[in-house]
Amino acid sequence: MKVFVKDPSSGLTQTHYVENNGLVADLKDQVADSMSVPSEELELQFGIMTLENEQFLADAGVLDEVEVSVHVALDGGKKKKKRKPHTTPKKIKHVHKKRPKALLEYFSVDESTGKVKRLKNESPNMPGVYMADHPDRYTCGKTGTMFYKLTADGKRLPVPAQKKKVVEVKKEAVKADSKKKGKKK
């Protein structure tokens, strides 16, 4: 009976001749000799079934001109990688706060005439998006377009003062040691 054995190291298929009533152990010995590997380290697999040494080839379903694959036992891999401790604090995500009646900031109604007046400028780049009104500029939140507010003579308004307090860094005088530093003698 002719059996094709697929070699895992080279990827080539070898042909082996065995008797019809032969044992799996006989085929395993032939494969071990051709691969120069001890037969105890090899496992033969036919389809999804692993072939045992005591089985007959015919009982295992191995017929003429079938392909049997060879598997070699390997040592285990490395240990699981240890996770690094996080040194920086977790980033706090921005949470959207819903503002009730926010639409009232965009429009006002003139009570005498009943006409609606826009309180905020609409962005020229994104129709339907209103620009934020800062003390010195108008800004579009979607496109980043910015228009600076100007004085009567056409100059830009000064940047408003920041409310944050500036922390002063104190420098301490370092005294020089009279002793020499370095390797001891």
Image (spheres, rainbow, N blue to C red):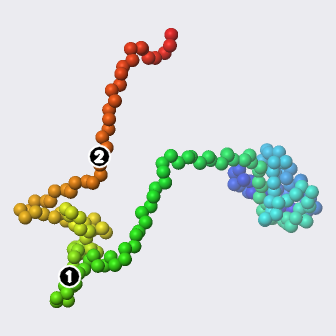
Image-quadrant location for residue 48: bottom right
- Above or below, 51 against 87 in this view is below
Which of disc 1 and disc 2 is earlier in sequence? Answer: 1
Residue drawn where x is 42% and y is 14% of the image: 180
Q: Is residue 77 left or right of residue 18?
A: left
Q: Is residue 93 left or right of residue 110?
A: right
Q: Position of residue 61 (x, y in %)?
A: 86, 67
Residue drawn where x is 44% and y is 61% of the image: 93
* Residue at mark 2 to residue at mark 1: CA–CA distance: 41 Å
Of badges 2 and 1, the one in the foreground is: 2
Q: Residue furthest left?
A: 153
Image-quadrant location for residue 65: bottom right
Q: Is residue 81 left or right of residue 61?
A: left
Any mark on residue 166, and which?
A: 2
Three-letter residue code for mark 1: Lys
Q: Residue furthest bottom?
A: 113
Q: Is residue 146 visible?
A: no
Q: Which residue is mark 1?
A: 117
- Above or below, 103 against 61 in this view is below
Q: Is residue 27 visible?
A: yes
Q: Residue furthest front?
A: 112
